[in-house]
Image (cartoon, grey):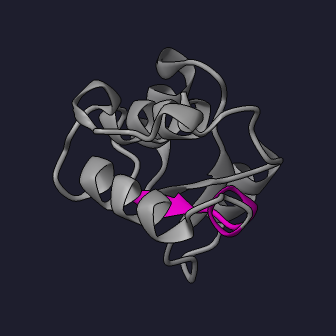
């Protein structure tokens, strides 16, 4: 929340990068209150790829403009497939359930 408060005071901020709050209600409230586009930070490497994709899906459903992921992509066994899955969720509005994920990602 500290970064959000700082961004709100500054007119020069183009986007606001925040950690996902963990639930849709609080994240939607944050997105709705922010005067700039919100992107989700990846944070620590998640236990499963599915957990990352579900977090992204939830954030996009709440109005996030996108994501800023690092290790959850480049430490993946197939970064290209991971990126394609993120594109499907963010740009094509697919759900995780609609994606054809490799069995080891589940």
**Closer-to-camera residue (79/28):** 79
Q: Is residue 80 magenta?
A: no
Image coordinates for residue 101, horizontal then vertical, percent: 39, 39
- Image quarter in which the C terminus is found: top right
**Closer-to-camera residue (96/77):** 77
Q: From this view, report whether residue 68 is shown above or below residue 18.
A: below
Residue farthest left in this picture: 92
Q: Residue at x 56, y 21 (%)?
A: 26
Q: Residue at x 59, y 40 (%)?
A: 49
Examine the image and state in which quarter residue 74 appears: bottom right
Q: Residue at x 67, y 33 (%)?
A: 48
- Image quarter in which the N terminus is found: top right
Q: From this view, report whether residue 76 is shown above or below residue 52.
A: below
Examine the image and state in which quarter residue 96 appears: top left
- 9 vs 80, left or right, is right
- 58 vs 78, left or right, is left
Image coordinates for residue 95, horizontal then vertical, percent: 26, 32
Image coordinates for residue 20, horizontal then vertical, percent: 63, 37
**Closer-to-camera residue (21/35):** 21
- 10 vs 89, left or right, is right
Q: From this view, report whether residue 32 is shown above or below residue 69.
A: above
Which range of residues does the magenta coloring cover?
65-74
Q: Is residue 68 magenta?
A: yes
Residue farthest bottom in this picture: 12
């Amino acid at each position: 929340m500290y970064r959000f408060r700082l961004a709100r005071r500054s007119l020069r901020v183009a986007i606001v990068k925040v950690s996902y709050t963990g639930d849709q209600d609080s994240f939607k409230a944050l997105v709705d209150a922010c005067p700039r586009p919100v992107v989700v930070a990846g944070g620590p490497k998640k236990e499963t790829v599915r957990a990352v994709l579900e977090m992204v899906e939830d954030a996009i459903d709440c109005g996030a403009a996108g994501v800023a992921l690092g290790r959850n992509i480049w430490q993946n066994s197939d970064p290209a497939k991971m990126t394609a899955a993120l594109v499907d969720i963010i740009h094509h509005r697919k759900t995780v359930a609609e994606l054809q994920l490799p069995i080891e990602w589940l």
